[in-house]
């Protein structure tokens, strides 16, 4: 059994990309590993320092974690800000992080370019906070996407540097875990790239979207004018729709529309209608469960208290030992 840590920022509801990219695999991992899954509300403040409804968004994401199968009895599911030890360890690790390496962070440079009015210190030290989230539980495996690989490498650097500075072998060096063949990449509806909240309105299908919203989004998905001759390669927007069909529909449906495309008889309107209904059929039970859990305040309170208790037990042990290693002692 290995320790796994992963978090999701509460910047909106979870979508199909989140589900197939991480959540579905979290459900599998909790059966075999010691898992810490957290809602990264501290992280969300780097880009949204004055959130519109932080508590409500956390509540929604928590309900979605639970509604999609994360079991608080098997995994430790918690809200990041409920574990103050994370902030203390971040402060300590900041003393071992150098300005030059933080300025070279790809995500910092990108965020500084896209939000020049909000280049805050938290944005600069984001990799340190991420490192603290991971090493506070001495994790060995961290599910990360391509955009987070540099941050994980920085986590390894900070862990090695701490060990070297204090002549200990305390923090392990966590490794990336990408789910291998179990990772399904879900494209968006805007014609290019992956499904995501930041890719524009209508690009993502959220797990709690009602049927009428799903139909409207799918029918607006980008396509092209259709193949001019048999065997013509699909454009990226059309390839994306076929990828969604391959995930959400049965093989017979996929084969039918593939044959229609190759014969130049494809009617994208018919494909979209079928895709929308298949997505609705898939998301309906998830949506029902998520909304039911979201309305149960007592259960959510119980889950967050249990998660905070379990996470703090692990985190407090690490911070206590780190303080002793550095030399903080009571008089």
Image (spheres, rainbow, N blue to C red):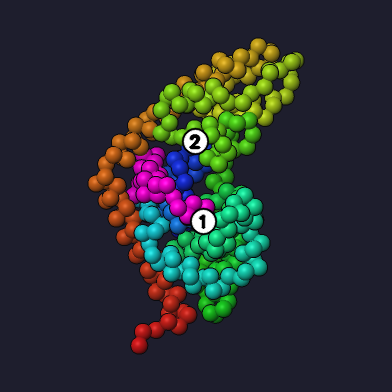
Question: Quick one: label 1, few (<14), some, or many (20+) residues within 10 Å?
Answer: some
Q: Magenta region: which residues?
A: 45-73
Q: What residue is disc 1 on?
A: 46
Question: Quick one: label 2, few (<14), some, or many (20+) residues within 10 Å?
Answer: many
Q: Please report whichever mark, 1 or 2, sits nearer to the chain's N-terminal start.
A: 2
40 relative to 201 in the view: left or right: left
Task: Tell me where residue 181 appears, x and y as whole percent.
Answer: 57, 41
Image height of 199 relative to 233, above or below:
below
Q: What residue is disc 2 on?
A: 16
Callout 2: SS: helix
| Camera-nearest residue between 251 and 194 | 194
Examine the rendering and report whether any part of residue 331 can be seen: yes
Task: Tell me where residue 192 appears, x and y as whole percent.
Answer: 64, 34
The single residue placed furthest to the left in the displayed view is 298
Q: Nearer the viewer, mark 1 or mark 2?
A: 1
Question: Residue 311 lies in what quarter of the image?
Answer: bottom left
| Residue drawn at the location 51% of the way across and 56% of the way down | 46
Q: Quadrant of the N terminus?
A: bottom left
- Give the tally of numbered discs: 2
| Camera-nearest residue between 79 and 317 | 79
Q: CA distance from mark 1 to mark 2?
A: 25 Å
Task: Tell me where residue 45 appears, x and y as whole percent.
Answer: 47, 55
Q: Quadrant of the C terminus?
A: bottom left
| Residue drawn at the location 27% of the way across and 41% of the way down | 296
Examine the rendering and report whether any part of residue 40 can be seen: no
């Amino acid at each position: 059994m290995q320790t796994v840590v992963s978090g999701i920022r509460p910047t909106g509801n979870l979508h199909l990309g989140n589900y197939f990219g991480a959540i579905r695999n979290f459900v599998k991992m909790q059966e075999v590993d010691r898992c810490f899954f957290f809602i990264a509300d501290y992280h969300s403040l780097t880009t949204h320092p004055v959130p519109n409804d932080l508590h409500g968004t956390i509540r929604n994401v928590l309900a979605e974690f639970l509604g999609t199968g994360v079991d608080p009895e098997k995994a430790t599911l918690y809200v990041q800000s409920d574990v103050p030890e994370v902030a203390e360890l971040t402060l300590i690790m900041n003393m071992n992080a150098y300005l030059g390496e933080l300025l070279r962070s790809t995500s910092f440079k990108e965020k500084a370019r896209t939000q020049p009015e909000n280049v805050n210190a938290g944005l600069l030290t984001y990799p340190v906070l991420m490192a603290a989230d991971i090493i506070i539980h001495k994790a060995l495996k961290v599910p990360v996407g391509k955009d987070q690989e540099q941050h994980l490498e920085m986590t390894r650097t900070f862990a090695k540097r701490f060990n070297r500075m204090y002549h200990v072998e305390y923090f392990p060096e966590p490794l990336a875990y990408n789910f291998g063949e179990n990772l399904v990449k879900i494209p968006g509806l805007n014609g290019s790239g992956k499904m995501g909240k930041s890719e524009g309105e209508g690009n993502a299908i959220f797990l709690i979207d009602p049927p009428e919203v799903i139909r409207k989004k799918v029918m607006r998905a980008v396509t092209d004018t259709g193949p001019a001759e048999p065997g013509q390669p699909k454009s990226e927007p059309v390839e994306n729709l076929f990828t969604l069909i391959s995930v959400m529909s049965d093989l017979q449906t996929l084969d039918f529309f593939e044959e229609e495309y190759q014969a130049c008889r494809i009617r994208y309107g018919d494909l979209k209608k079928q895709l929308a209904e298949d997505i609705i059929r898939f998301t309906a039970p998830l949506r029902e469960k998520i909304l039911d859990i979201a309305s149960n305040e007592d259960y959510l309170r119980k889950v967050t208290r249990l998660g905070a208790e379990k996470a703090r037990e692990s985190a407090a042990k690490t911070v206590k030992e780190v303080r002793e290693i550095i030399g903080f002692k009571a008089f």
